Image (tube, rainbow, N blue to C red):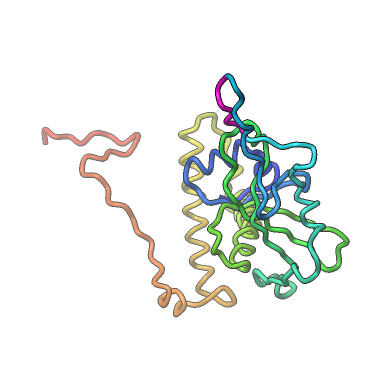
Amino acid sequence: MLADAAYGDDSGFREGLISLELCYAVGIKSATTLWPPGIGPLPPRPKGKTGRPPRLLQRDKTHQPLSAKELALCLSAIDLRIVSWREGTRGVMRSRFAALRVRPAHRDYWRKEPHPEHWLLIEWPKTEKKPTKYWLSNLPASIALPKLVATAKLRWRIERDYEELKQELGLGHFEGRNWRGFHHHATLSIAAYGFLVKERCLFPPSGNSRQLEAADIQIHIPPVQFDYKPRGATRPNRTA
């Protein structure tokens, strides 16, 4: 699941994705608070003489999380690596990145357990005085930095596909007022776009037929049930 900071900065949205067991790499704002690597919230207070034992995590004036920007500004030039993620119209696209294992800190003082560790991905181009983009991801801790960067940057491709669907294949031309009609319209638009993408891969620079055969790319069509009747179809005449 990929999203920009408008969605990725919402902790409820991220927790919903985790509950669905989905991996994600979402953008966050520079002010998002995080616990630095190896540091987390303080444990619950010791039990007093009376009452129930405290269970909620805590923090004090000297033990506070940092913003994503503050964490990035603590990095040195050695911590940043140049990574390329795709071929653009002006050549290979590359920039400087750093990845840290952190814990989200959003209202963890209401929790009994700290948030799980995440990747904080930081992009800091060499020509900029400060970092430009931040991502938070729950991808495995063993993932390599180039793959993490390529995953986070895939959102641009999705935006481009969505734009082509609306402008070239009529996804944005639907004028109905019900969900079923839009579902049918969107399904046909996406099917047409998938066909065009596969045809485009037959020609350079996207690829050629030999590459497709080597990759064993196939479209699997699910079987149609015996008693299936398309919506709006007439019933067969069984008396004949």
Residue that lies at the very extreme toward the right in this rendered image: 129
Residue drawn where x is 56% and y is 39% of the image: 113
| Residue 10 image offset from top left, x and y in percent | 66, 38
Q: Is 16 on the left or on the right of 146, as rendered? A: left
Q: Is 40 in front, or is 16? A: 40
Total marks drawn? 0
Please state which of residues 162 and 189 is positioned toward the viewer in this rendering: 162
Note whether 36 is above or below 83 in the view shown: above
Question: Residue 102's spot in the image, x, y percent?
Answer: 65, 52
Horizontal relation, residue 118 to residue 222: left or right = right
Identify the magenta region. Answer: 51-56
Residue 12 picture quarter? top right
* Dominant SS in magenta: loop
Query: Residue 59: x percent and y percent?
Result: 71, 37
Does the stretch in magenta take in 74?
no
Residue drawn where x is 50% and y is 48% of the image: 22
- Residue at image position (62%, 67%) is 145
Vertical placement of residue 53 versus 105, above or below: above
Which residue is at a point 75% across and 50% down the rendered structure image? 68
- Position in image of residue 239 (x %, y %): 11, 33
Q: Residue 213 is drawn in which quadrant?
A: bottom left
